[in-house]
Image (spheres, rainbow, N blue to C red):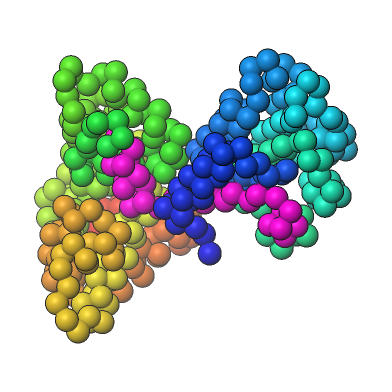
Amino acid sequence: MAKKLRDVIDDYRRIIADLQKKIYKPVYLLVGEEPYYIDRLSQYIAEHVLSETERSFNQQILYGRDITTSQLIDMARRFPMMSSQQVVIVREAQDLKKIELLEAYVRRPLASTILVLCYKGKIDRRTSFYKLMLTGGEVFESAKPYDDEVQNWITAYLKEKGCTINPKANAMLVEFVGVDLTKITREIDKLFTLLPEGSKQITAEHIEQNIGISKDYNTFELNAAVAACDTLKANRILNHFAQNPNGYPIHVTIAALFMEFSRILKLHFLQRRRTGVISDREAAAELGINPFFFGSYKTAVKRYSLTKTLEVISLLREYDMRSKGFHNGAATHGDLLRELVYRIMH
């Protein structure tokens, strides 16, 4: 089961705390589809374990595609010069051929070497190499987060910088940039340089003016229109999408609608399961959304019965297949979306 973002952050902080206390593991496997914390950990090790003078002779930063596993083992087995330790960092370790040959080194690592493997992507946890790393080194796993996790992360990230972001702007930022934390921080840092002097909150207007996503025409607004059965607004947004197919890919729109109705379905079951009164804030937490948006879900669950919600989810699966060419005929993606939304709301 993939780790939650909060668990990833807890592991990151634990490892940083150990490094600050000079508690080092002989081998670090930093692995996962979300590279932000992998990069931060490897950067911290590169900048803080050795002094500036020690790095000249005792720190190697390599790339997996440029070395063999045998060469890496030879480097790791070298003794440091005029230092108690050496650091060997392998970026893009997923490109290292026959990484399993490192098992022999992990079993008997050199105490004076800190070997860091930055493996970006999924790794086979069934391999003996991975299992050995769990006992003979430090494994840090950074899974790709979900949209709602990222929105909470953005809020916390900005709070540390003395800034806030309103919920709609937050949702727009995730829609435009995705869940790549590195890209998000890059866009936020760019926004800081463009905000009016003294401004302490990022708004939807700031996102629209400086990042490029329309505050009126996006999947967030389409979801709201469909949830409220606002046919006029939904059609206006769909027409905009149809005129800009590259900017609004159909698979992204269908995925956003699927997420919306999955939450509506979850709220149906939540209401049936709970015997006592549940607050809006508690329900929002169960759905993984900002409480600011919970009102639209309360409305949607009244408009879309449980049976209808299940039918909509089935429709979304059908149109996802049709968008990929299955039994579609000559319909354009714009036509498919209009037809899909009409069937959802009627």
Q: Is residue 336 above or below residue 168?
A: below
Q: Assign the magenta stretch its main secondary structure.
A: helix
Q: What residue appears at the point 74 percent right and 53 percent down from the top-left corner?
A: 136
Residue positioned most to the bottom = 275
Q: What residue appears at the point 26 percent right and 62 percent down from the top-left corner?
A: 285
- One can see residue 193 in this view: yes
Question: In terms of depth relative to the viewer, which is nearer, 58 or 184?
Answer: 58
- One can see residue 253 in this view: no
Residue 310 is inside the magenta segment: no
Q: Please state if 335 lies on the left or on the right of 13 as rendered.
A: left
Question: In terms of depth relative to the viewer, which is nearer, 44 or 304?
Answer: 44
Counting from the top left corner in percent of width and height, residue 296 is at: 15, 59
Task: Count how many numbered circles sit on residues in the image.
Answer: 0
Counting from the top left corner in percent of width and height, residue 15 is at: 55, 45
Q: Looking at the rendering, which quadrant does residue 319 occupy?
A: bottom left
Q: Is residue 275 above or below residue 14?
A: below
Counting from the top left corner in percent of width and height, residue 122 is at: 62, 51
Q: Looking at the rendering, which quadrant does residue 68 occupy?
A: top right
Residue 154 is inside the magenta segment: yes
Q: Is residue 210 above or below residue 8?
A: above
Q: What residue appears at the point 42 percent right and 53 percent down from the top-left corner?
A: 6
> Which residues are the magenta region?
130-158
Q: Please state if 304 lies on the left or on the right of 35 as rendered.
A: left
Quadrant of image for the C terminus: bottom left
Counting from the top left corner in percent of width and height, residue 249 is at: 38, 43
Question: In terms of depth relative to the viewer, which is nearer, 226 or 138?
Answer: 138
Q: Please state if 214 lies on the left or on the right of 139 as rendered.
A: left
Q: What residue appears at the point 62 percent right and 42 percent down from the top-left corner?
A: 23
Q: Please state if 235 lies on the left or on the right of 334 as rendered.
A: left
